[in-house]
Image (cartoon, rainbow, N blue to C red):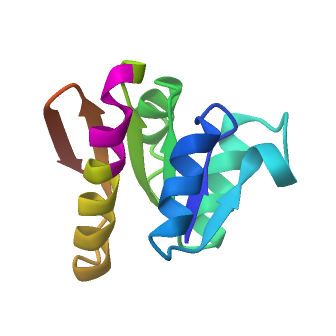
Amino acid sequence: MIIFDENVDQWIIDRILEQGYEVYSIREYRAGISDREVIDITGSKKGVLVTEDKDFGELVFSHNLKNCSVILLRYNKSDIEQVVRNIVKILERQLRVPAHYFYTISKGKVRSRKM
């Protein structure tokens, strides 16, 4: 399951839904909850969190909350279609690799760090 933080553009969520992925939107079901609660929900659903909030890097590394993978998006609106393609590539990898990673998608670049 893909968990979308409330700050992720709805257009991205819709494109991922069109790809056939199961999606849970924090904005739709639990708007206003804390980042820690978002991580807890993602872990309990054995999901991958997609967010634009860089505070999640501190949460998972400094506070050792490593029970899920996180995809951090850093992009311009003009790059949004490439961002979706990169999210799909990461999701395909996550289905094959049973480890947790912190991914950062930025213009023309995808970085990953095993947690």
Q: Position of residue 66 (x, y in %)?
A: 43, 54
Give me the residue at 58% from left, 36% from top.
8
Give me the residue at 45% from left, 41% from top.
60
Q: Quadrant of the N terminus?
A: bottom right
Q: Which quarter of the figure has residue 69?
A: bottom left
Residues in magenta?
78-84
12 is higher (above) or lower (below) than 16: above
Q: Which quarter of the figure has residue 83?
A: top left
23 is higher (above) or lower (below) than 39: below
Q: Position of residue 78 (x, y in %)?
A: 35, 22
Give me the residue at 42% from left, 49% from top.
70
48 is higher (above) or lower (below) than 108: below
Q: Nearer the viewer, residue 17 or 110?
A: 17
Q: Position of residue 95 (x, y in %)?
A: 31, 78
Q: Is residue 21 magenta?
A: no
Count of numbered marks: 0
Q: Is residue 80 magenta?
A: yes
Q: Is residue 80 visible?
A: yes
Q: Is residue 115 visible?
A: no
Q: Nearer the viewer, residue 16 or 38?
A: 16
Q: Position of residue 6 (x, y in %)?
A: 70, 37
